[in-house]
Image (tube, rainbow, N blue to C red):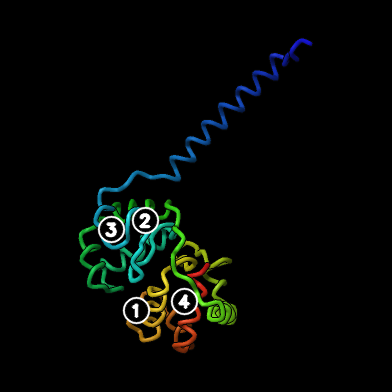
Amino acid sequence: MSAMKVPPRRASCQSVMLALMLTLGVGHAKAQAPAVPPKAEACVACHGPQGKSTVPQFPVLAGQGARYLYLQLRDFQEGRRKNELMSPQAATLTRDEMRALADYFAAQVAPPLPFKPDPEKARLGKAKADETLCTMCHLGGLKGQNEIPRLAGQHYDYIVKQLSDFKARRRTNDAGNMTSVANTLSDADIENLAHYLAGL
């Protein structure tokens, strides 16, 4: 039996489509993997390679929204958010360097965390998240959007600290949204929410 011949016009269309898919694929890969910015090296000490923090006190940057990361760096630089480690680091960054860092860390894949949430506390945390309508801002799966951060898969200790800081008004760079939500939370609520979010 002879091999089936593909009409020349159809073969030409297939070649064009294949070339187009390969071109788009390469362009997409480049868009998803920005080069490591020179200033990223300073971030590794606390946030780990590619922003995949293994230290519970330091947030995972990998997979966090670029817009959110940029705004936090700007807030640290301009004094709207304060931290003894981050404020000096952000002080010398240009806007372009902040954008490059934000784009780089946003393009990384968030790692699975070793933290094992307590199932009952996580259940109560989910109920509290539903009650306080967390997904209205942080979206489904608590993956964040634009200037609203990704909460899913963040370190337990970091979540507890941030919610506690919002509640105590030690952190106020949120236009009052998180401060008003955190003000309604008990210490147990904060603990339960952290179990739930860290386990996502």
Q: Identify the amino acid type marked 1.
A: Arg
CB under 8 Å between discs 2 and 3: no
Tag shown at residue 102? 2
* Kind of element beneath mark 1: loop
Residue found at x 41% / y 63%? 68
Residue found at x 26% / y 59%? 45
Asked whether residue 7 appears in the rendered view, the answer is yes
Report how far apart the C-alphas of labels 3 and 4 lie in the structure. 24 Å
Which residue lies under the disc numbered 3? 43
**Where's residue 11, x and y in %?**
67, 18
* Kind of element beneath mark 4: helix
Q: Identify the amino acid type marked 2.
A: Ala
Residue 119 or residue 128, whichever sits in front:
119
**Where's residue 183, x and y in %?**
45, 87
State which tag comes first along the sequence, 1 or 4. 1
Asked whether residue 132 appears in the rendered view, the answer is no
State which tag comes first along the sequence, 2 or 1. 2
Q: Which of pointers 4 and 2 indicates the residue nearer the eye?
A: 4
Mark 2 neighbour class, 10 Å CA radius: few under 14, some 14 to 19, many 20 or more: many
Tag shown at residue 194? 4
* Kind of element beneath mark 2: helix
Report how far apart the C-alphas of labels 2 and 3 lie in the structure. 11 Å
